[in-house]
Image (cartoon, grey):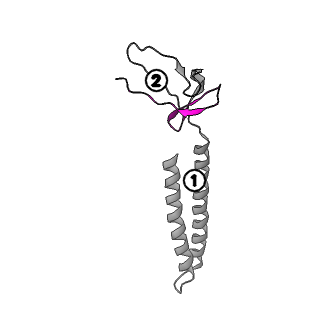
Amino acid sequence: MKAARTILYILAGIIIVFSFLFILGAFSPDGSTSWLWVGIIGLLVGFLCIFWGSRLGAKAEKATQNVTLRVDLPGNVSMDTIKCQSCGAPLSAEDIKMVNGAPMVSCPNCGTTYQLTEEPKW
């Protein structure tokens, strides 16, 4: 869709430029009135290409993208309970949300919000 929209915009620009040249040529001493009509029709076609390109863009923007994060843990992994850094209350998986690519923890007991950091294993 994005490629078609870009092609339509480029095509519209080319058609509009040549249409203006036809309109200017119609008023020259060697010009004819048929050039004026070709220029006007070309302008209409160019603006129709812009309209169609914008309609293609509106359809593409309506599509939403869902991101699913799956964690694959290697081997035998033992899970410890996660506790709040402020009050020590146990946290559940619902309390951890991904915000701008970083895991953020919101404690339901004390209301503290902080970024979850992983301690080194050694």
Q: Earlier in the sequence, mark 1 or mark 2?
A: 1
Q: Is residue 112 visible?
A: yes
Q: Which residue reaches farthest bottom?
A: 29
The residue lying toward the viewer, choosing from 51 and 82, is: 82
Left or right side of 109 for 104: left
Does residue 19 lie above or below 27 as drawn?
A: above
In three-dimensional space, the C-alpha distance between marks 1 and 2, rounded to whole angstroms, equals: 40 Å
Numbered tag placed on residue 53 in the rendering: 1
Q: Nearer the viewer, mark 1 or mark 2?
A: 2
Find residue 115 and report its horizontal and vertical position in percent: 52, 33
Q: Which residue reaches farthest left?
A: 122
Name the residue type under label 2.
Answer: Val
Find residue 25 and report its horizontal and vertical position in percent: 53, 79
Residue displayed at 48% across by 49% down: 3
Find residue 98 and report its horizontal and vertical position in percent: 54, 32
Residue displayed at 54% across by 81% down: 31
Circle 2 packing at 10 Å, graded few (<14), some (14-19), many (20+), is few
Does residue 121 lie above or below 29 as drawn?
A: above
Residue displayed at 59% across by 33% down: 113
Name the residue type under label 1.
Answer: Gly
Judging by the rendered image, the residue that carries numbered circle 2 is: 71
Tell me the magenta residue range. 97-122
Circle 1 packing at 10 Å, graded few (<14), some (14-19), many (20+), is many
Does residue 40 lie above or below 88 as drawn?
A: below
Does residue 50 lie above or below 19 as drawn?
A: above
Tell me the quadrant of the picture where the C terminus can be found. Answer: top left
Q: Secondary structure at mark 1?
A: helix
